[in-house]
């Protein structure tokens, strides 16, 4: 991938502008329509919508059920070469994104958004962050939108995170090269909870994590494959029995695979009594 600046872009119900500049973002708060929106600060705007442009999330994007703007961090760079990073204070390997550069990009991204962080959180994708989970996806889906800062190199100067009360969010205990993939994971999990994005809303109520448990096994035709039959109860047509079987399997799988979730589920049930 080249390091040449790529124009900032918008995609969503109101417009698709191939070269949306920061100034335009500032001048058009009306662009923030009712649909949930992500404003993504990145050195690689061309990485979006990426996988989010396909299948259900892609269709929902085209239908304006959610939208996004990318803000090219390089546009805020310093000097002739539009430098966005510098060496770490105190020495050490790699480069760190400058607070003045990131700060200017955040100011632009925030134009026209609610000041209340509950309505519009500012997130920094970071391996040091709070682990992203279904509960956070639900909370973000309840906001009007989010601003997401995608890091690169060794990360971002700490002062800019403090100054803008940025929430650090991790998608797992591993280190990626940049925040763009992590941002797409977060956006995907969030927008599928928005009304009308999935064809069948009931599926989000029954899937893994919605009740603190992992999902039961799923089967479909053919009735027998490689000598393996679908569990009889599932073809019995007895809805009560099917529901109890699914529940039991869900509990068994959660207990075996995720003792942490199981413990939390049990203590939640005790509290509920
Ligand atoms: N020096 C950082 C550290 O040790 O915590 C890692 C920086 S990483 C090479 C570059 C960028 O990738 C980060 O700034 C962050 O935006 C993104 N990133 C890497 N791993 C991530 C994860 N597990 N979750 C979310 N974002 C991640």
Image: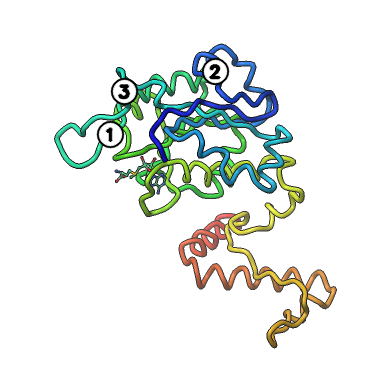
- Which residue is the site of mark 1? 96
Q: Nearer the viewer, residue 88 or 190?
A: 88
| The N terminus - image quarter | top left
Task: Note whether ligand 1 is within 8 Å of mark 3.
Answer: no
As measured in the structure, the alpha-carbon distance from the residue carrying label 2 to the one carrying label 3 is 23 Å
| Residue depicted at x 68% and y 57% | 206
Q: Mark 2 or 3, which is nearer the eye?
A: 3
As measured in the structure, the alpha-carbon distance from the residue carrying label 1 to the one carrying label 3 is 16 Å
Task: Note whether ligand 1 is within 8 Å of mark 2.
Answer: no
Give SS at disc 1. strand
Give SS at disc 2. helix
Q: Are marks 1 and 3 in contact (CB under 8 Å)?
A: no
- Which residue is the site of mark 3? 81
Residue 260 vertical placement versus 83 (above, below): below
Residue 38 vertical placement versus 248 (above, below): above
- Please provide percent x and percent y for residue 14: 69, 23
Q: Nearer the viewer, residue 271 or 175?
A: 175
- The image's colouring method is rainbow
Residue 37 vertical placement versus 187 (above, below): above
Residue 2 figure quarter: top left
Task: Note whether ligand 1 is within 8 Å of mark 1.
Answer: no
| Residue depicted at x 54% and y 38% | 48
Upstream in sequence: badge 2 or badge 3? 2
Classify 10 Å Cα crowding around label 2: few (below 14), some (14-19), many (20 and above). Answer: many
Residue 208 figure quarter: bottom right
Q: How many marks?
A: 3
- Which residue is the site of mark 2? 25
């Amino acid at each position: 991938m080249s390091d040449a600046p790529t124009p900032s872009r918008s995609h969503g119900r109101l417009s698709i502008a191939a070269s949306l500049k920061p100034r335009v973002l500032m001048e058009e708060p009306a662009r923030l329509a009712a649909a949930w929106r992500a404003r993504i600060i990145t050195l690689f705007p061309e990485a979006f919508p990426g996988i989010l442009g396909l299948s259900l999330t892609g269709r929902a994007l085209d239908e304006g059920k959610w939208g996004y703007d990318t803000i090219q961090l390089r546009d805020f760079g310093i000097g002739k070469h539009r430098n966005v990073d510098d060496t770490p204070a105190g020495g050490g390997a790699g480069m760190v994104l400058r607070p003045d550069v990131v700060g200017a990009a955040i100011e632009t991204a925030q134009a026209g958004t609610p000041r209340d962080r509950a309505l519009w959180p500012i997130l920094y994708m970071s391996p040091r962050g709070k682990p992203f989970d279904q509960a956070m996806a639900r909370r973000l889906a309840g906001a009007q939108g989010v601003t997401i800062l995608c890091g690169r190199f060794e990360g971002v100067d700490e002062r800019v995170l403090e100054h803008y009360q940025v929430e650090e969010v991790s998608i797992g205990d591993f280190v990626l090269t940049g925040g763009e993939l992590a941002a797409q994971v977060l956006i995907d999990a969030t927008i599928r909870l928005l009304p009308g994005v999935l064809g069948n809303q009931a599926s989000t109520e029954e899937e893994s994590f919605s009740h603190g448990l992992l999902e039961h096994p799923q089967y479909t035709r053919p009735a027998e494959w490689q000598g393996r039959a679908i569990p009889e109860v599932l073809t019995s047509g007895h809805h009560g029995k099917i529901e109890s079987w699914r529940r039991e399997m869900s509990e068994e799988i959660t207990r075996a695979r995720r003792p942490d979730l199981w413990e939390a589920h049990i203590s939640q049930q005790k509290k509920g009594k």
